[in-house]
């Protein structure tokens, strides 16, 4: 059965050869033995990337279920007015807190200034300033005792012959060097 004009005709009785993929097995095995871990990491990375993108797409679709074209203008205006009122209210609260803080700071500064003036006045009069309560006590003591006398009933902290470099004069707290030689062990 030859065709005209020299064309070859396919013989229908011959079965097709090598239809399975066994010829790929050696090359795939060699590739996986060389780059198997890289392929596994790439597959895991692609899987995680797909999961991340799906999650982002689902949250985007949930966050804006009504598209901007379907919103009526009245609801948009009402929402903006409510947002503006909320912002104004929060700003007024913040301004009130700031004014209260500023007033408190001014009171503290005034109190400090007053205390400095009192201290300066007491120093001019020759008194020492040790606080509000002690100022009153100092004025009473100054009125009762007009002359200053040194205290003579003090005893000295150490004897007059004490020298820290001499090594004596200590009681139980003297330092001794350790023993020489190896430690005694079994």
Image: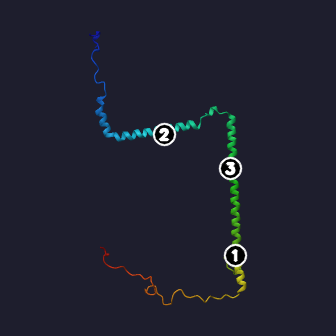
Residue 40 falls in image quadrant? top left
Question: Who's the residue at 39% across and 41% down the image?
Answer: 41
**Residue 156's spot in the image, x, y percent?**
55, 88
SS at badge 1: helix
Q: Earlier in the sequence, mark 3 or mark 2?
A: 2
Q: Nearer the viewer, residue 17 or 172?
A: 172
Residue to which mark 1 is pinned:
133
Instruction: Tell me the distance, in whole angstroms, between the alpha carbons under discs 1 and 2.
Output: 70 Å
Compared across the picture, whether 54 is left or right of 63 comes to: left
Q: Between tags 1 and 3, which lies in front?
A: 1
- Please say if the residues under marks 1 and 3 sit with CB atoms less than 8 Å apart: no
SS at badge 3: helix
Question: Who's the residue at 42% across and 40% down the image?
Answer: 45
**Residue 25's spot in the image, x, y percent?**
30, 32
Q: Between tags 3 and 2, which lies in front?
A: 2
In this rendering, is residue 124 above or below 32?
below
Instruction: Tell me the distance, in whole angstroms, between the alpha carbons under discs 1 and 3.
Output: 44 Å
Residue to which mark 3 is pinned:
90
Instruction: Tell me the distance, in whole angstroms, between the alpha carbons under discs 3 and 2.
Output: 37 Å
Compared across the picture, whether 103 is left or right of 30 comes to: right
């Amino acid at each position: 059965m030859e065709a005209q004009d020299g064309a070859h005709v396919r013989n229908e009785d011959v079965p097709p050869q090598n239809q399975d993929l066994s010829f790929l097995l050696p090359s795939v095995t060699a590739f996986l033995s060389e780059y198997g871990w890289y392929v596994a990491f790439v597959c895991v990375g692609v899987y995680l990337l797909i999961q991340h993108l799906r999650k982002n797409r689902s949250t985007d679709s949930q966050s804006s279920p009504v598209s901007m074209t379907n919103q009526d203008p009245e609801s948009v205006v009402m929402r903006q007015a409510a947002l503006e009122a909320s912002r104004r209210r929060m700003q007024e609260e913040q301004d009130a807190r700031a004014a209260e803080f500023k007033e408190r700071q001014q009171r503290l500064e005034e109190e400090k200034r007053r205390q400095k003036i009192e201290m300066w006045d007491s120093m001019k009069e020759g008194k020492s300033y040790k606080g509000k309560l002690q100022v009153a006590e100092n004025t009473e003591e100054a009125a009762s005792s007009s002359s200053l006398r040194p205290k003579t009933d003090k005893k000295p902290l150490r004897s007059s012959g004490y020298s820290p470099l001499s090594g004596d004069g200590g009681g139980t707290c003297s330092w001794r060097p350790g023993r020489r030689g190896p430690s005694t062990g079994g």
